Amino acid sequence: MLNQLFELWEELAMGNNDKKLNDEFFTHIENDEKQSTNQMDSMLDEAKINASDEIPPPPVCWQIINENGETSTIGTLGNFSLVIGKAKSRKSFFICLAVSSTTKNGLVLNRFKGTLKASKCDVLYFDTEQHKYHVQKAVKRVCSLIGNSNPDTLHTYGLRKYSPSQRLAMIQHAIYSNDHVGFVVIDGIKDLINSINDESEATMISSKLLKWTEERNIHIVCVLHQNKGDNNARGHIGTELVNKAETVLSVSKSPENKNISIVEAEYCRDKEPEPFGFEIDGYGLPILSENWQVKTTKKTSAIGMDEIPPDQIYALVIQCFSKVKDLGYTELVIQMKLAFKSRMKKPIGDNKAKEMITHCKNEGWLIQKSAKGKYKIGAFSHE
């Protein structure tokens, strides 16, 4: 229909004012508008959610069992999660634990548990950075951890030599061409775009992840570097993914022992898992660390508002809005938690972040023009 419309338009533009041709042109436009309207009505009907609808919770596919025996859900089908960390913090070794538990579809190291359904038990593992030799070494670690030299549900791909657009297209094709896929890892999500600070590309990637996970009923784990100067995920893509991820986990080297990497929850919709440490044994495999301590535990973050200088609190507000002009409440809570951990070197939970937002609003450091409107930075003043 579109080609016919262009042909008619070209003839009219060239001076052919035949009434029949003119009528035919506008009939095409009217039909096209009706088709667009019908398509939009159909999309809205599909997207509509009624209070009376019975919508089951998304199936759990990846869990961490805490030392007290309680289970924290890290990933569910229909969502994506994010793993962030500095370069060489051993993010890929931690990802090895995620891939191992979901490939085995059971317990690994008595801490990490995969719970994929039999019909959705295939795991796709994409690496965008490493040479294929090192990608294969990562696969062999998985095989050693699960005691299976060639698991038929694990499909691994090294995408280093391809362009960003090719990597994106290959991942999408692999996801949509296998109905048994339930768990996907993209180690190097930034390599699917040309610039980490391009807002349109960041929106495109997050939209792709939301579309893929919902349409294919899968869980995707993305890996992204943190900034060198702070602990925030890199670029606009980092901000976008943090805001939309089901879970954000950070991996960092212990300041007391560089052989130990510490995994902590930055944000989690379910009960946050306890921080834990892991190291690499003599066989090159990740193992849980014993007798380790981390100074940034949740127990040490019970700080009263009167213990933080006002200018420090305002600096947190500025950092929250370092890449955007305004934030919704949920996004602001996430950014406040990340900013606090980055500047104060101690994590806080949702309740403390909300308390700080209320305090900043009362001081006029945060401005919200309407009850459910977005927040913006206010002027700093303190008596």
Image: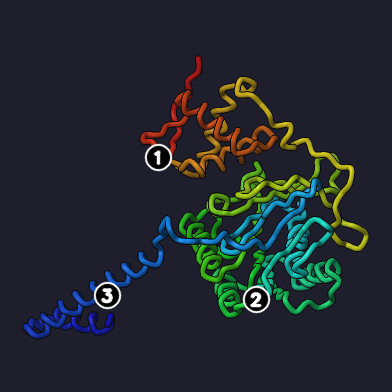
The type of residue carrying mark 2 is Ser
The type of residue carrying mark 3 is Gln
Q: Position of residue 320 (x, y in %)?
A: 54, 38
Measuring 64% from the left and 34% from the top, which residue is drawn there? 343
Compared to residue 309, the image places residue 81 above or below, namely below
The type of residue carrying mark 1 is Lys
Return the disc, 1 or 3, that comes first in the chain's sequence.
3
Q: How are the colours assigned in the image?
A: rainbow
Give yes or no for contact between labels 2 and 1 (Cβ–Cβ under 8 Å).
no
* Disc 2/disc 3 C-alpha distance (Å): 37 Å
Measuring 50% from the left and 66% from the top, which residue is drawn there? 211
Quarter occupied by residue 148:
bottom right
* Secondary element type, mark 3: helix
What residue is disc 2 on? 119
Q: Nearer the viewer, mark 2 or mark 3?
A: 2
Residue at the far top in the pictured view: 383
* Mark 3 nearby-residue class (10 Å; few <14, some 14–19, many ≥20): few
Quarter occupied by residue 139:
bottom right
Compared to residue 272, the image places residue 58 above or below, namely below
* Disc 1/disc 3 C-alpha distance (Å): 35 Å
What residue is disc 3 on? 35
